[in-house]
């Protein structure tokens, strides 16, 4: 299995809603990442998990809350988002931090905040 | 500060032509240079990658040329096809540090029949 699976593929949420994005990989990768991508822009790193521990938080607002329940799963909990948070949210994984070979992205969740 | 600079921003090529996308970097600690292809609504997918001890790498119609002294690398797509129409991102990585993948700004390629 060489895939990173993200669910849901699309999500529309109101500014007062709470929702979660889910990411799963079964490649034995120990680093997992959340990225945000706006249209016509490169992915922007949000969070890095290494061995299920948060390694990097790129100054992301607290309305985004990551969670790594186990080595295969990564969640992103969303609460009180703003319309400007609408974007494609990408999950990725790699063997370990500092190892870019085998870096694999999921297909993303297209989030629309209304 | 943009760690990897990419050009052009957009590119239109006739079917069968050669598409060339260029990237430049400053950090000499970078030791891995992947190219990603992204279709609308999908995540980036690794296309081809090179290490700095090699000046060229070819996989099918895709070739990376690497100039270590100039700190530049480029993607050549030979015999470009309409199915190649996508956004291409170059990236660079160093083995030190957790934020290990720095992206270029992307090139939107359109191949016209």
Image (cartoon, rainbow, N blue to C red):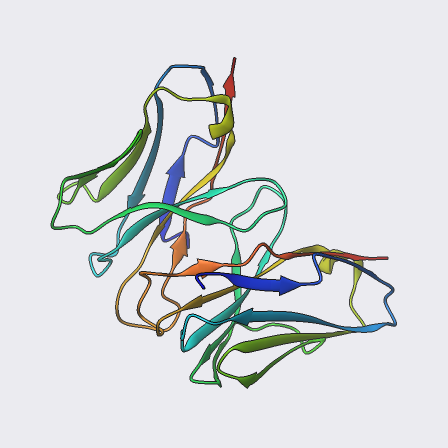
In the image, taking residue B88 as reference, residue B66 lies left or right, namely: left
| Image point (31%, 68%), residue name | A99
Check the image and report above or below for A5 versus B86.
below
Residue at 85% across / 67% down in the picture? A15
Q: Position of residue A55 (x, y in %)?
A: 45, 81
Rendered location of residue B68, percent (x, y)? 15, 45
Relative vertical location of residue A59 with respect to residue A39 in this rendering, above or below: below
Looking at the picture, how far across and down is residue B92, in whole percent? Answer: 32, 54
Residue A5 lies in quadrant: bottom right
Quarter of image, res B71: top left
Q: At 63% from the left edge and 45% from the top edge, which residue is drawn?
A: B41
The image shows residue B1 at horizontal and vertical percentages of 42, 55
Residue B71 or residue B39, whichever sits in front: B39
Image vertical order of residue B70 relative to residue B52, above or below = above
In the rendered view, tell whether residue B24 sits above or below residue B14.
below
Q: In the orientation shown, which residue stands out farthest toward the front?
A: A1
Closest to the observer: A71 or A64?
A71
- Closer-to-camera residue (A30/A89): A30
Identify the residue at horizontal 45%, vertical 49% (top origin).
B45
């Amino acid at each position: 299995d060489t895939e990173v699976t993200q669910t849901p593929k699309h999500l529309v949420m109101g500014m007062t809603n709470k929702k979660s994005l889910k990411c799963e990989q079964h490649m034995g990768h120990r680093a997992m990442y959340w990225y945000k991508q706006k249209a016509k822009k490169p992915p922007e790193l949000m969070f890095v998990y290494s061995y299920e521990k948060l390694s990097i938080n790129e100054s992301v607002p607290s309305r985004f809350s990551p969670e790594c329940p186990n080595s295969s799963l990564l969640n992103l909990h969303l609460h009180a988002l703003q319309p400007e948070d609408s974007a494609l949210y990408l999950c990725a994984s790699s063997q370990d931090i500092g190892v870019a070979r085998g870096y694999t992205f999921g297909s993303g969740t297209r989030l629309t905040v209304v | 500060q943009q760690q990897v600079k990419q050009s052009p921003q957009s590119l239109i090529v006739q079917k069968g032509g050669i598409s060339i996308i260029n990237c430049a970097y400053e950090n000499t600690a970078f030791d891995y240079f992947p190219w990603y292809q992204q279709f609308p609504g999908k995540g980036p997918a690794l296309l081809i990658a090179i290490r700095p001890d090699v000046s060229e790498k070819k996989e099918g119609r895709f070739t990376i040329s690497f100039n270590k002294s100039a700190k530049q690398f480029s993607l050549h797509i030979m015999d470009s096809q309409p199915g190649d129409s996508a956004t291409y991102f170059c990236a660079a990585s160093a083995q030190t540090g957790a934020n290990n993948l720095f992206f270029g700004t992307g090139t939107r390629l359109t191949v016209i029949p």
